[in-house]
C-alpha cells in the first residue's frame, strides 16, 4: 500500500480524523489491510482490503462508532485467516426500526426528559416507524421522505415539522455511525408557520371572564378554572393539565417536568384563590379525570370551544392565552428578560416576538419627551 496514508490507528486518533471534500481512507500501520474510511459527511467506517484470487477486494466492517480498534483488528485477522469469512458480503445498513430501537435509543432517546420522550415516542410509533421502519437506512431516499412529509403536512403541518426534525436527527446519527453517506432529509424545508401571534385585548379578556362565569353556574367549574389558570400564569396547557399537588406551594408552582425542564411559576393572588378552591381528591392531580382520579383530565378541554364561540374569539387557541400573558406583560413595561423567565422560555429570542408590542408606549414617551424639550427650547414652562 505504498503511497497511501498510513498511521497507527487508535480510538483517539480516529476521533480526530476530519472530513475532507472527498472521501479518503487511512490505513492501519499495525494490521495489514485494515483502514478507516472517512466520508465528506463526517461518517467513519472500518474497511478491510484483502487478496481475492487475482485481484484485491474491499469489504466494510461497520461503523467505527460501534466497534473499537482492538475489535476491528481481531476481526481483520479472523477474516484474513478464513477465506470463507472474508468472502462474506459487505456490511449492510440496519433497518430503520432496529437502528432506532438500538444505537439511536441508547445514544439519544434515553437521555431526553420524560415529556420529550412521550412526544417523540408518539411521532415514532404513529408516523416514522410505519413509514420507514421496515426499510434499511441506506434505502430511505429523499423522494420517499418528501412524499411522506407532504402527505403528513396536508393534515398537520406543525406535527409534520416535528416529525421531520426527529427524522433528520436520527439520520444524522446514522451518518455518524457510518451506515449512510448523505442525509435524505437534507434540503427539505419545514412548513412555514404563521408569524402573527394572536393575543386577547382587554375587552376580549373581559368577555372571556364573563362567559366563564356563566359556564361555572352551569356546572363547568373545573374546566373554567383551568382556563383561568392558563391566563393568569402563562403556563402551557400540559403544565396545568398534569399539575400535581406535590408541585403546588403557597405562592408558586414548582413544576418538575416542563418543556424546558424544572421551573418555578409565581402565583398571583387570583391564581392562588383558584388553586385553594380545588377539592383535595385522593389522587395526585389538581385537576383529575372525572372518571379516574388517578389520571389527569383530558387535555382537550371541550368547554373551550363553547366558551370562545360565546365570547366572540373563535380564532383563539388555548395556547394563545400564554401569548396574552406575554403580550400584556411587555405592554405594561415588564422587561423582556423578566417575561422570558416568567414563561419559562429557553432563551429570550422566543420572547422577543412580543417586543414590538411596546412600540406604542415608546412612541408615546418619545412624543412627551420631545414636547417637553421643545417647550424648554422656546422658553415656555414645562407642563
Image: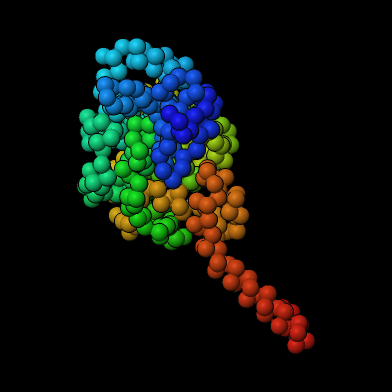
Q: How many marks?
A: 0
Residue found at x 49% / y 29%: 6
Residue found at x 40% / y 48%: 319
Relative to 71, say whether 200 is above or below.
Answer: below
- Image quarter for residue 374? bottom right
Residue found at x 28% / y 14%: 83
Q: In front: 35, or 226?
A: 35
Viewer can see residue 12? yes
Give the image location of residue 140, x and y in percent.
26, 38
Residue found at x 35% / y 15%: 80
Q: In front: 353, or 295?
A: 353
| Image side of residue 47 versus residue 366, left or right | left
Relative to 281, say whether 355 is above or below.
Answer: below
- In what quadrant of the picture does the C terminus appear? bottom right
Viewer can see residue 218? no
Give the image location of residue 204, x and y in percent.
41, 59
Give the image location of residue 187, x and y in percent.
34, 50
Q: In front: 295, or 293?
A: 295
Give the image location of residue 347, x and y in percent.
54, 46
Q: Colour scheme of this structure image? A: rainbow
| Image side of residue 244 versus residue 269, left or right | left
- Image quarter for residue 216? top left
- In what quadrant of the picture does the N terminus appear? top left
Residue with the most extreme bottom position = 378
Amino acid at each position: 500500500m505504498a503511497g497511501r496514508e498510513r498511521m497507527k490507528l487508535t480510538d483517539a486518533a480516529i476521533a480526530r480524523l476530519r472530513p475532507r471534500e472527498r472521501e479518503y481512507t487511512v490505513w492501519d500501520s499495525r494490521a495489514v489491510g485494515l483502514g478507516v474510511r472517512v466520508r465528506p459527511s463526517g461518517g467513519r467506517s472500518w474497511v478491510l482490503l484483502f487478496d481475492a484470487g487475482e485481484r484485491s477486494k474491499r469489504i466494510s466492517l461497520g461503523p467505527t462508532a460501534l466497534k473499537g480498534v482492538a475489535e476491528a483488528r481481531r476481526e481483520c485477522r479472523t477474516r484474513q485467516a478464513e477465506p470463507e469469512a472474508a468472502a462474506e458480503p459487505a456490511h449492510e445498513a440496519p433497518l430503520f426500526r432496529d437502528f432506532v430501537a438500538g444505537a439511536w435509543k441508547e445514544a439519544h432517546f434515553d437521555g431526553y426528559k420524560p415529556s420529550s420522550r412521550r412526544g417523540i415516542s408518539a411521532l415514532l410509533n404513529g408516523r416514522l416507524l410505519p413509514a420507514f421502519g421496515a426499510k434499511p437506512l441506506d434505502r430511505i431516499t429523499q423522494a420517499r421522505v418528501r412524499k411522506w412529509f407532504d402527505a403528513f403536512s396536508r393534515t398537520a403541518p406543525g406535527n409534520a415539522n416535528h416529525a421531520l426534525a426527529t427524522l433528520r436527527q436520527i439520520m444524522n446519527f446514522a451518518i455518524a455511525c457510518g451506515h449512510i453517506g448523505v442525509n435524505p432529509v437534507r434540503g427539505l424545508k419545514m412548513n412555514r408557520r404563521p408569524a402573527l401571534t394572536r393575543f386577547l385585548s382587554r375587552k376580549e379578556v373581559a368577555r372571556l371572564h364573563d362567559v366563564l362565569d356563566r359556564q361555572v353556574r352551569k356546572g363547568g367549574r373545573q374546566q373554567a378554572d383551568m382556563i383561568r389558570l392558563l391566563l393568569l400564569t402563562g403556563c402551557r396547557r400540559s403544565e396545568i393539565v398534569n399539575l400535581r399537588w406535590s408541585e403546588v406551594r403557597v405562592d408558586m408552582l414548582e413544576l418538575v417536568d416542563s418543556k424546558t425542564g424544572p421551573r418555578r411559576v409565581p402565583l398571583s393572588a387570583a391564581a392562588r384563590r383558584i388553586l385553594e378552591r380545588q377539592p383535595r381528591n385522593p389522587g395526585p392531580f389538581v385537576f383529575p379525570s372525572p372518571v379516574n382520579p388517578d389520571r389527569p383530565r383530558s387535555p382537550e378541554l371541550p368547554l373551550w370551544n363553547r366558551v370562545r364561540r360565546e365570547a366572540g374569539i373563535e380564532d383563539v387557541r388555548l395556547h394563545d392565552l400564554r401569548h396574552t400573558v406575554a403580550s400584556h406583560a411587555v405592554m405594561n413595561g415588564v422587561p423582556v428578560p423578566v417575561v422570558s423567565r416568567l414563561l419559562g422560555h429557553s432563551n429570550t429570542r422566543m420572547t422577543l416576538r412580543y417586543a414590538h408590542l411596546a412600540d406604542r408606549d415608546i412612541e408615546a414617551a418619545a412624543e412627551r419627551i420631545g414636547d417637553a424639550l421643545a417647550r424648554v427650547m422656546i422658553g415656555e414652562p414645562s407642563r
